[in-house]
Amino acid sequence: MNIYVGNLPYDVTEDELKGLFSEFGEVSTVNIITDKYSGQSKGFGFVEMPNDSEAEEAIKALDGSELKGRNIKVNQAKPRGERPQR
């Protein structure tokens, strides 16, 4: 399952995010989205967990939890096609 993680502190690393989600099961990939010009984090990212039940458990436990002073938003990522047009 692909999981969206929002409101991330700008200094959080992919390793820190992987460690947080690894408490709930196997993590296959972690990707923090960065600005292509500055390299600065945009404050959100995605975590891929192959086991859906472990992913659901992580979402329930981590949504609204605090990470480095910020309450993070965690939910199942929506496929790109479902987003409204700007």
Image: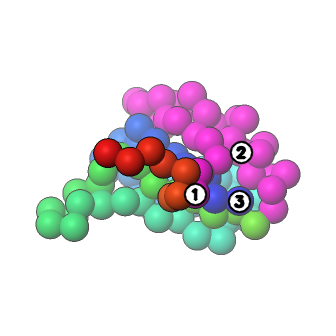
Q: Residue furthest bottom?
A: 28
Which residue shows up at 77% across the image and 45% down it?
Answer: 56
User: Split into 4 quadrants, where in the image is the C terminus?
Assistant: top left
Relative to 65, is 13 above or below?
Answer: below
| Outermost right residue | 53
Q: CA distance from mark 2 to mark 3?
A: 11 Å
Magenta stretch? 51-79
Residue at disc 1, secondary structure: loop
35 is within the stretch colored magenta:
no
Locate the N terminus and report the quarter of the image it occupies.
bottom right
- For image coordinates 62% across by 42% down, the residue present is 75
Q: Is residue 40 left or right of residue 7?
A: left
The amino acid pointed to by label 2 is Ala
Sequence order check: which comes first, mark 2 or mark 3? 3
How far across and how far down the image is residue 16, in percent?
A: 49, 56
Disc number for residue 1: 3
Q: Is disc 3 placed on a helix, strand or loop?
A: loop
Which residue is disc 2 drawn over?
A: 58
Question: For this rendering, which residue is in front, 54 or 77?
Answer: 77
Q: Check disc 1 and report the residue beneath it.
A: 79
Instruction: Give amino acid for label 1.
Output: Pro
Q: Nearer the viewer, residue 35 or 84?
A: 84
Q: Residue 76 colored magenta?
A: yes
Q: For mark 2, does the 10 Å Cα neighbourhood hold few (<14), some (14 to 19), or many (20 or more) residues? A: many
How crowded pointer 3 is (Cα within 10 Å; few <14, some 14-19, many 20+) is rated as: some
